[in-house]
Image: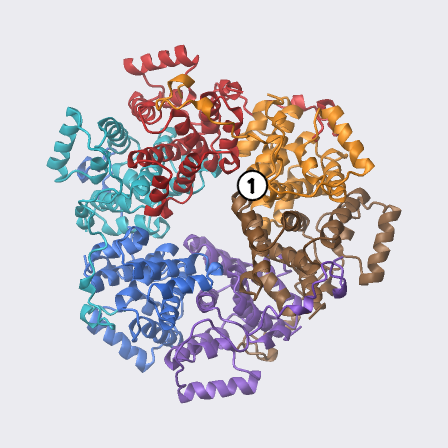
Chain colours: A red, B orange, C brown, D purple, E blue, F cyan
Amino acid sequence: MAQRNRKTASTGRSAKSRGSAGAGDDTAIIALKLPPGELSSDMAAYFRKCEEKLGFVPNVLKAYAFDTAKLSAFVAMYNDLMLAPSGLSKLEREMIAVAVSSYNRCYYCLVAHGAGVRQLSGDPVLGELMAMNYRAARLSPRERAMLDFAVKLSAEPWLVEEEDRARLRRAGFSDRDIWDIGAVASFFNMSNRMAFASDMRPNSVYHGQGR
Amino acid sequence: MAQRNRKTASTGRSAKSRGSAGAGDDTAIIALKLPPGELSSDMAAYFRKCEEKLGFVPNVLKAYAFDTAKLSAFVAMYNDLMLAPSGLSKLEREMIAVAVSSYNRCYYCLVAHGAGVRQLSGDPVLGELMAMNYRAARLSPRERAMLDFAVKLSAEPWLVEEEDRARLRRAGFSDRDIWDIGAVASFFNMSNRMAFASDMRPNSVYHGQGR
Amino acid sequence: MAQRNRKTASTGRSAKSRGSAGAGDDTAIIALKLPPGELSSDMAAYFRKCEEKLGFVPNVLKAYAFDTAKLSAFVAMYNDLMLAPSGLSKLEREMIAVAVSSYNRCYYCLVAHGAGVRQLSGDPVLGELMAMNYRAARLSPRERAMLDFAVKLSAEPWLVEEEDRARLRRAGFSDRDIWDIGAVASFFNMSNRMAFASDMRPNSVYHGQGR
Amino acid sequence: MAQRNRKTASTGRSAKSRGSAGAGDDTAIIALKLPPGELSSDMAAYFRKCEEKLGFVPNVLKAYAFDTAKLSAFVAMYNDLMLAPSGLSKLEREMIAVAVSSYNRCYYCLVAHGAGVRQLSGDPVLGELMAMNYRAARLSPRERAMLDFAVKLSAEPWLVEEEDRARLRRAGFSDRDIWDIGAVASFFNMSNRMAFASDMRPNSVYHGQGR
Amino acid sequence: MAQRNRKTASTGRSAKSRGSAGAGDDTAIIALKLPPGELSSDMAAYFRKCEEKLGFVPNVLKAYAFDTAKLSAFVAMYNDLMLAPSGLSKLEREMIAVAVSSYNRCYYCLVAHGAGVRQLSGDPVLGELMAMNYRAARLSPRERAMLDFAVKLSAEPWLVEEEDRARLRRAGFSDRDIWDIGAVASFFNMSNRMAFASDMRPNSVYHGQGR
Amino acid sequence: MAQRNRKTASTGRSAKSRGSAGAGDDTAIIALKLPPGELSSDMAAYFRKCEEKLGFVPNVLKAYAFDTAKLSAFVAMYNDLMLAPSGLSKLEREMIAVAVSSYNRCYYCLVAHGAGVRQLSGDPVLGELMAMNYRAARLSPRERAMLDFAVKLSAEPWLVEEEDRARLRRAGFSDRDIWDIGAVASFFNMSNRMAFASDMRPNSVYHGQGR
């Protein structure tokens, strides 16, 4: 219904004259000037592996690279949470990541993990829905219970009690699954905040992935 | 960093086995069963014009079509606000629409007007940023002031006072512009809520537009 | 229990020396200086009808009168919502208007539609209760369900889901009624915000109506 | 603009058929069944004085009357706060009472003290504005500063700090005045909550006072 | 896990070089300069009794002492609520005091009444839990229901309705008990706010009591 | 002012008859039944070091011990953040931990890190104030700015922008310090949520430390 002809903008301002709202995202990764550090050989290898497999090093890693010990700790925790064996599929973990990041309105994580959901699911609309309002998505009861828990834990952690765990159990999750749902949701509550504290910007390549 | 190979999902669940999270968006437009109504000739003509220009009738119009008087009033107000001459460009009006809909987390309007921002600006990242968190976008002071007003008016209207209008004037807006910013923001606070009240679903074609 | 004798105010300040808190409400209708516009003949006729039937033109209409197209769209939508046939009585629609405006603390709409509730119901206390806290009113289960939905839609629209519609159906509302409850509540979420954006002031005549 | 003819309600439901929304307010004062107690002679005399001066005993006093010690403590604190000498006029104290009660949406106190503001000020619109949204009232800077403090103390007491007191001093208030503003606002935060805990209902006579 | 050796602080700043975060709490009791007043003989006797029984006069009493009428009203209400016969034990009343003060984050009342809970219960951990998050405490259903009501009444009094009272009745409370729970919770909503309005500081002796 | 004699509780209920509110904290560490795992030799050594240095293994480590990879990642990140060289003293990092945990009302972290603040500062009142309301503490401008940033990042991360970083710089913090403040605050936003997700209980020994 919105009219789609760029040339007719009533004020005569050329829409094209404005720079991109994401200008600099690939070069000015964070708003903090940190003294450059040297990568350990492990981390240097990990960066090469990212280049090979993804075609780029995610900006969050470049942001942490000023201190290889911090980078290393972050990578270890991230990879364990998102990639190690779990009762949650990788897609489910990415769905949690995006739903939490949507609650927190985190640009970096919504872009990077929205792409993850689109790619792992092959359903671009699922990626949009996780970023916009997971309640509007057509989800299984299992998925809905998982995201309700993750978002409550993000929004009002002080209200999470035994009944919330019981609800997950009734949806078929094991206690170990509950740990994992909690851990992924908690991790992105950390990661979202690091992105806000430092104004972290996502690699622009993510925007087009999985569309 | 998220691993991108769908086949390796650790639990063996096939990501493909789930239906799309937006399944039915083009057919079950709202969750209310409303007795079908007859379009006035004006509205019938308007629908044909949508088909010609956009290739489809936006679902919000189909939703209102059960009562041609309601549809007609909605279309008149919408077109005046979004397309009539104004000190605000059409893109600016769409940016307000999306920033307000982001505050309210409205699936319908984020999808439909996110596409509008992408198309009018030619900057897909701008569309994403309006939907995710407008504060993270690289905006002109004018744009930022406009969106700050629109979002405050959405979130805490009872706190909007003369100082808020003064801030807009300092950013270069006329009193008529202030009316228009207020009117677009207010309209989407209505429209978002109609979408929630009826579970309105966006035409799936929007998802790919302007990427 | 409060002492009622104005003369004994302990500080000796004369209560009368202050101007009315609503001074100027009838003359300085909004805080925006808008270039005057010309009314279409339809709208001019509508204003005359207001004068005849109500004895005055509501300030909201005078506010919109700077642009007869905007005025006309507003009037069409308003009259359809509040006066056209519906499963909701006119009083019920006014009750929604006031309960929503109370949530948003909108001076203009509380005054104008508070008067509406008092007049349509013949129960001045109902008007007060809608403006103060609808939960304290002695309401039928139907009325309570209707207002709970309207206020949730105002406060946290992102949480309105199928269960909320189901609750209305259990209270006896049809799907068309649900649309109408949603539409009236949504409209006043727009209208309240226009009042805040422009500092709209109600005609002082409303204050005494229906007492 | 709202149509004022009760007979034309579109659904044919007679507006008159519903009981008043305040039915029982004068007889079923609270929703707790408390064993009746005996008034001390002091309190009995105080009740007689209320009857003489006001024409009725405020329901809050009748509610406390089940325990004359509690009643007596309440009356002592109330009368000291609202009637004893202070740098705040009695009207100012009532304005605080209503603005706080509006924040808390307390039916009892809005009705009883809204009447107080109307009567002490001789400005019925001031009473309405305190109950609806004090920010929309035409107030002196002194009044505005006083109410801003009182409402912040009600809404987010944990954020009240030295700068808030400094703002009051800049508006001309002494340290003793600040104590009094704080004390009246704090008292109504107590009183509002007692009204909610017990569902306290105001004497219906208040509704018409000072109109 | 936190390292406990003060000498190793990495920056070399001596932790000891900073003054105590509670410096002046025993001498500069409030941040308002109030003209000193004279105690009535009753209040003077009460202060002596405090010295004898507690070893000190609580700072809240010293704060009110600038006006013996205000002090007297405060003491009468406080002693009735916290010490007079009631279906609630004194410990239960102190638990409400601390849970409410925790919601409001009131330094004065958390310190003074946290000590009260520790002493009356002989369970220092109970004092900590009331101050930190009562939901994490191992409580009886009666205690939990009591605190849920008190905290809801503090946080969102406008949502307290008959169902909340019914829940207390189901937990075994009488209507008189409900009044008392409401009254204690309401009183601390007043008292907390007086502490914020005046920056009231607790006697430092409380910190070590009941550990 | 609260009466301190346990024997006089008015209802005759023996306060001693209730179990401790922290009963089981040392044995039932979390509310999830997780299959026991085997510690790596590194982690086993780390546990022994905890026993030697602290006299106990913090429950959070025991909770993670079901999976030595998760434990190891957690320990690496924790130790880097809290103990590695930084422009923030160890005490400052513990203060952030407690202020964030107070915002989130996290029992585990308030107890464990409250003890940390008391021990590192030698000022037990500082520990209380961080847990109750850091705004009431006598802090240096540097400390206050640091905690304001940490708590805003916890409460409304979406509002953290360049001006917030600028405020830290004006308070003397370097960009690297800002990263560290953000990182510690973000970490505890994760850790608090893991505690809520699993109902993690602190070692009871913490309660008495540093008093």
Q: Is residue F173 above or below residue F140?
A: above
What is the crowding at mark 1: few (fewer than 14 residues within 10 Å), some, or many (at least 20)?
Answer: many
Where's residue C110, x and y in %?
65, 59
Query: Outermost residue, right direction?
Result: C41
Q: Does residue E28 appear in this view?
A: no
Q: Is residue D21 above or below residue F164?
A: below
Where's residue F98, x and y in %?
30, 44
Quick one: quadrant of the C terminus of chain E? bottom left
Query: Outermost residue, left direction?
Result: F52
Mark 1 belongs to which amino acid? Asn
Residue F161 vs residue C110, the one in the foreground: C110
Q: Does residue E166 appear in this view?
A: yes
Where's residue B88, x and y in %?
70, 34
Find numbered disc 1 in the image and state the secondary structure of the residue it sits on: helix
Quick one: quadrant of the N terminus of chain E? top left
Q: Which residue is mark 1?
A: B104
Residue at 59% over, 27% down: B127
Q: Quadrant of residue E119?
A: bottom left
Residue at 58% over, 63% down: C140
Q: Is residue C189 above or below residue F59?
A: below
Residue F31 vs residue A59, the one in the foreground: F31
The chain holding disc 1 is B
Q: Is residue A98 above or below residue E204?
A: above
Where's residue B180, x and y in %?
70, 40
